[in-house]
Image (cartoon, rainbow, N blue to C red):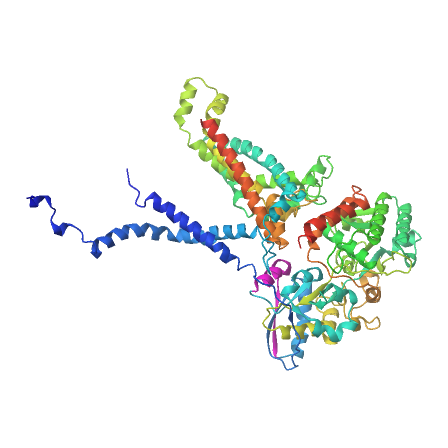
Amino acid sequence: MSRSFVPRRSVLRGALGAGALAAAAGPLAACAPGSSGSEPRKLTGTPSASAKGEITIWNRSGDLFKVFDAAIDAFRKAYPDIKVNHQAVDIDAKLANTLISGTDLPDGSFWDDAKIGGQAEHLYDLTDLIAPYRDKTSAYKLSVNTVDGRIYGVPWDLDPGLLWYREDLLEDAGVDPAGLKTYDDLLAAARSLREKNPKARPLHMEKDPFLGQLWLEMLAGQQGTSLADADGQVRLDSKEYRNILNWVRDAVDDDLVTHAEYLKQADLAALENGQQALVPWAVWWSFAPQQLLKKGKGKWRAAPLPAWTPGGARSGAMGGSSFIIPAKAKNPELAWLLYEFLCFKEPGYSAVYGPSEVYPGGLTTSVPSYGPARRPDKPLFEPVAALGGQDLWKVAVDAADTIPSAAPIPAWWAKSVDYLGNNLQRLIEGKMAPDDVIDDSTKKIQRNLVDRA
Amino acid sequence: MTSGTLTPPRKERAAPDSPRPTRSRRKPFLAPYLFVAPFYIVFAAFGLYPLVFALQLSFTDWKGAGRANFIGLENYTYLLTSEEFWSSLGNSAVMWLLIVPLQIVGGLAAAVLLANARLRLRGMFRVAFIAPFVTPLVAMAQVWIVAFDTDYGLVNHLFNLVGLPDIDWLQSTVWAKPTLALLFLWKTTGFAIIILLAGLQAVPGDVYEAAALDGASRKRQFWSLTLPLVRRSIAFLVVVQTLAVFQMFAEPFVVTQGGPYGSTTTGGLYLYNHILASDLGTGAANSFLLVLLVFALSLLSVRLLRSRDE
């Protein structure tokens, strides 16, 4: 029998020692989760036109990256001594972690409006720099980028909601699109379309819970409210949300709804075969007739959304993005110069929205949030052939002007989809009543998100 | 007078301050520690320290930045009174029921077949069973998404060919769990077969010869010899797969994102959702509750095995 070279007692002592070491590491580890809060860092100084340096900028990959790449080229010409490293990055996956860890940060990044409020403590306070442009910038975009009275994002695109409709089908059914002034008118139009075609389920209602909730927020924003108030408190239990949810229930009860996921196979089929003819959605739905629809190409048109009350606002925002500058960026002033150029200077915003190699007719999926860039008489993109040559620019900028101001989007917004987004789906499926959606969602959002924020 | 021979010669005794014997004693004492030190250092840095750190985190409200406030057992009481937490465990339990019994039965049947030397194309079957196990899960999950799509998926297409209606495989609360369970089975049954095959091959052949001489039928041999002799392999699989099912994350994350309506939010995915929401304290508490649960389930399996042995 071989004898152990290391006595068992020593092994145990060693193990206890390791345990003690680990226990001692615990209090030390307490230092890691930030021992103190910090004041927001203000970015105030604007560098001169002869500024020099190098910046790294993150953007989403895809067509929009190419569009921004071309616009950044215009910036390089205006500021030849600033080198811009423009990188395509999976921002949703990377940016939040990078901001928290503070390593390998870009000098600036594109980001969803809905995510900015939650990370404000890691971003530069841009209030002073945006001040000269404030009066001419969309109140909605300023409000969603504001936390505790300070602005943390450079407002970029504005995504007004529009009513997309099949002109030929409405004409056949004797519906005048100009007469769709309220949501009750919209229901009446849907009934007329179904009378003409019994297979029609004219109204699109979104099956994806996230997009469904974004859509709901567009309709709420149109009435001047949103899921949370300026203090982050839930305000779902309101007349405005009841209006929307009761309207949804009425449409469902009357069997007027195609319940499908945004531009997935079933949705496209219903759009092509005339089953769907009315889609209240953001301006970026213009992508469908331009890129995806075949039979329906040229037959769709855009109009302002109906109002919830006669004379009420005819649009709300659905989505949107801004630019942020991380508080630990190496060259924040130079990043600001770039974003000021892209958002507030004519050569910059024209380079993005105007005709480009990627979009020869211009970028038609949003409009700028800066007022002077949104002049109806100076369109940045051309009439759209896939919309029968309609001047989408005019319709979209007119709608954008009516979007009411909002409250900042709370950090927990995306998580609330697990409750409100899912319950909206249950309502559309006829499994829940409007009051139940409000009560259940409010209770769960309050307990799981607001109380733990 | 004492005899001088009883006293050992002075030169043979080690002087207390002599360096030579001390060094020779220390060498064998230190050497093993030095050899095992790399393991302990790595284990302490990447195993023990994160564990202790996470335990500490579970008593705080840390959001990934800013101050970490000590909040005692609040994260644990929140979870234990949360409908979503129990629902995630319920989802994992249903997945366990859909996966583990089927995998053990199917895996054992496949292993018995593969252990049969007379089976034709045995090598090809072995490769076919093991291939999914070594294929990246995300790639398989993408195949699943396409195959089980309601509108243009292959599975519904085949259903339609035989006159069956479309099924909302991944979008209905009834079908999403079985569809994910099937993916998990496809992915991991190869591993189960390897373990069971190893167990079967460890059974001495003369046991079967003796049984055959005694007139035991094939069926009797299976129930009275094969099954009892691979029981330890089965118990091992039950423990390992219980751990895997309760920690299941990638499958629902890629295929259903926990939906529809949270019906495929497993314990592992629910934990991740806290981390994603920067609620690291609750995430850490959730992980410890899962550890306790899985530990209890594993202990139960081992106890059941031991009582059978006794």
The magenta span reads: A81-102
Q: Is residue A44 left or right of residue B201?
A: right
Q: Position of residue B60 (x, y in %)?
A: 58, 53
Q: Is residue A332 left or right of residue A264?
A: left
Spot the residue most to the front.
Answer: B1
Judge whether residue B7 is colored magenta.
Answer: no
Q: Between residue B15 and residue A201, name the one nearer to us.
A: B15
- Residue for point 47% across, 50% down: B48
Question: Is residue B142 among what the camera can see?
Answer: no
Give the position of the C terminus of chain B as an image quadrant.
Answer: top left
Question: Is residue B249 among what the camera can see?
Answer: yes
Judge whether residue A90 is colored magenta.
Answer: yes
> Number of marks in the image?
0
Q: Is residue B230 left or right of residue B30?
A: right
Image height of A18 relative to B88, above or below: below
Q: Between residue A386 and residue B242, name the one nearer to us.
A: B242
Q: Between residue A187 and residue B5, name the one nearer to us.
A: B5
Q: Position of residue A214 (x, y in %)?
A: 75, 55
Q: Position of residue B61 (x, y in %)?
A: 61, 54
Q: Position of residue A423 (x, y in %)?
A: 75, 46
- Residue for point 29% across, 50% down: B29
Q: Between residue A22 and residue A216, name the one nearer to us.
A: A22
Quarter occupied by residue A140: bottom right
